[in-house]
Amino acid sequence: MTKVTGEQVKDAVQKAGLTWVDHHDCGICGQMVGYVINGDCISFRSGCGCSWSPDRPCSWDEAADHINRQNRSGDWGDVAAKVAKRFGLELEPALDEVC
């Protein structure tokens, strides 16, 4: 499986004109936390409705790692492709592994 690079994520986000990418909703209050995009910079906003923390600068490679850590098959389907799509990035279809 080919890994997504930080540069691919950055290019896709900028092409799509995104300023926010969902990561997950808080298990307590339900508010979404995620990535904030400002030009060439990306940061992670972990503060939600029940907690607060300042945005944490991160790298485009960190966002790519988030995609690359997801499953490509299983009970929930191709999770990596679903997460990549949030960043405006289309992944090649996952190939079923042959045992």
Image (tube, rainbow, N blue to C red):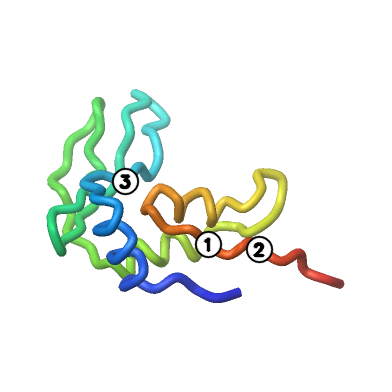
Q: Which mark is residue 21?
A: 3
Q: How far is mark 1 from mark 3, CA to CA?
A: 17 Å
Q: Amino acid at mark 1?
A: Leu
Local crowd size for mark 2, using a 10 Å CA cut-off: few (<14), some (14–19), many (≥20)? some
| Circle 2: element type | loop
Q: What is the three-letter code of the residue carrying label 2? A: Ala
The reply, left or right, for residue 31 in relation to residue 3 is left
Say whether disc 2 or disc 3 marks the residue closer to the N-terminus: 3
Q: Compared with residue 20, is residue 9 higher up or lower down, i.e. above or below?
A: below
Going by the numbered disc 3, the residue's amino acid type is Val
| 10 relative to 87 in the view: left or right | left
Q: Residue at x 16, y 42 (%)?
A: 53
Secondary structure type for disc 1: loop
Q: Earlier in the sequence, mark 1 or mark 3?
A: 3
Would you say the residues marked 1 and 3 are in contact, meaning their CB atoms lie under 8 Å apart? no
Where is mark 2, residue-wise? 94
Instruction: Count all numbered tags in the image, as a single digit.
Output: 3
The image shows residue 36 at horizontal and vertical percentages of: 21, 48
| Left or right of residue 4, residue 94 in this image | right
Q: Secondary structure at mark 3?
A: strand
Specify the quadrant that holds the N terminus.
Answer: bottom right
Which residue is tagged 1?
A: 91
Whether label 1 touches label 2, CB < 8 Å: yes
Q: Whole-Å distance between the Cαs marked 1 and 2? A: 8 Å
Other-residue count near label 3 (Cα within 10 Å), few / some / many at <14 / 14–19 / ≥20? many
Q: Residue at x 52, y 49 (%)?
A: 82
